[in-house]
Amino acid sequence: MTKTYALPSGSVSADVITVDTSAPGVSVRAAMVNQKLGASAPFSSIVSASSADVIVNANFFAAYSGQDKFPVGHVMADGTFLHGVSGLTSFGFTGSGAVYVGRPAVFFYVRGGRNSWACYEMNSKTQGSDLSVVYTPAFGGSVPIKIDGTAATVAGGVITDVRAVTAGETVAIPANGYVMVFGNDFTSTSWYRVPAVGTSVTLTPGLTDSDASGFPMEEITAMVSGGPRLVENGAICTTLEPGFQEARFTSAVTSRTALGKLADGKLVIVSTGSASIQQLRELMLQLGCVEAVNLDGGGSTALAYQGKLIRSPGRELTTTLQIFTH
């Protein structure tokens, strides 16, 4: 798999895997350790526990000593969101193997009776007076409240509790449900309706009205996010998203991971032990990618092929993208 590629900014050696995700027997899965936020494991353990033919590291995460190891961006596994914070370039995969690339603006809609509540993020550490966040068991057994507002608890598809909360409290997350946390400015809007105990509700992800990414959210079963974007609409993309403007994301030469999409819809997975972001842009374009994004790299760079470790990371990982071909 390893090959050296001559690029305008200098040669790069990389492992490149191309997958027809729509072929019979092929499936794509995003996974988090124990399907819980903050959990991590050695890459070798992740590989040995999976029957996937290809496993690669995915989302950036708070990886350093003392940090909570929460991911950055969207993570959807087996059709269920584990973490939902919009803004980054994401790769989404349908059950039939179609690949979508963009920056989907996802809301998490709770609907019941004639009312609905749009939660802006899922399992996010951020809470604000004008925000609404939904917390599921993937977050843990409880959620610490950071703002004054309202918490609505849903268990078994029914709203079981609605109460005012203040910063410093903790609200339990039911194992068979979730908790919505609304800031006081959010609940002061004219369109907010107070959730009623006893109401049967459903929770589904959907795009905001202004979203133009084209993700068919009802069909997406796996999603991971990264940055910066490397190729967009068949051309090198030099725009740097907020949070990806440090040297380690640009000029530094380090181990890197990238995902790309070819014009025919195939998925390209790239792992290299040494490249700058510009070299990665040029490589993904040379490989024929019409869309591409940089994933976590450095000490997180990991690749396994048919059970063998091709590139081992220097730290435990939380989120991986796995390809099954049987």
Image (tube, helix red, strand yellow):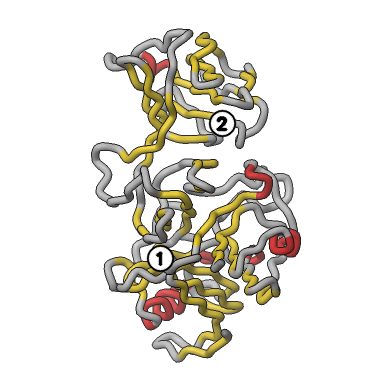
Name the residue beneath numbered marker 2. Answer: 136
Quadrant of the rendered image containing residue 256? bottom right
Give me the residue at 40% from left, 65% from top.
Answer: 22
Residue 127 position, x and y percent, is: 50, 29
- Residue 9 lies, with reference to residue 260, above or below; the image says below
Quadrant (top left/top right/bottom left/bottom right) for the C terminus: bottom right
Name the residue beneath numbered marker 1. Answer: 22
Q: What amino acid does circle 1 point to?
A: Ser
Disc 1 crowd rating (10 Å Cα; few below 14, some 14-19, many 20+) is some
Callout 2: SS: loop
Disc 2 crowd rating (10 Å Cα; few below 14, some 14-19, many 20+) is many
Give me the residue at 39% from left, 88% from top.
Answer: 8
Viewer-proximal residue, 87 or 99?
99
> Which callout, 1 or 2, points at the residue further toward the start of the chain?
1
Callout 1: SS: loop
- Is 310 on the left-hand or right-hand side of 2? right
Q: What amino acid does circle 2 point to?
A: Thr
- The answer to whether the residue labelled 1 contacts the one labelled 2, judged by CB atoms less than 8 Å apart, is no
Residue 55 position, x and y percent, is: 60, 65
Residue 9 position, x and y percent, is: 43, 85
Residue 246 position, x and y percent, is: 50, 61
Quadrant of the rendered image containing residue 110? top left
- Is 162 on the left-hand or right-hand side of 93? right
Quadrant (top left/top right/bottom left/bottom right) for the N terminus: bottom right
Q: Give the spatial CA distance, label 1 vs label 2.
A: 31 Å
Q: Nearer the viewer, mark 1 or mark 2?
A: 1
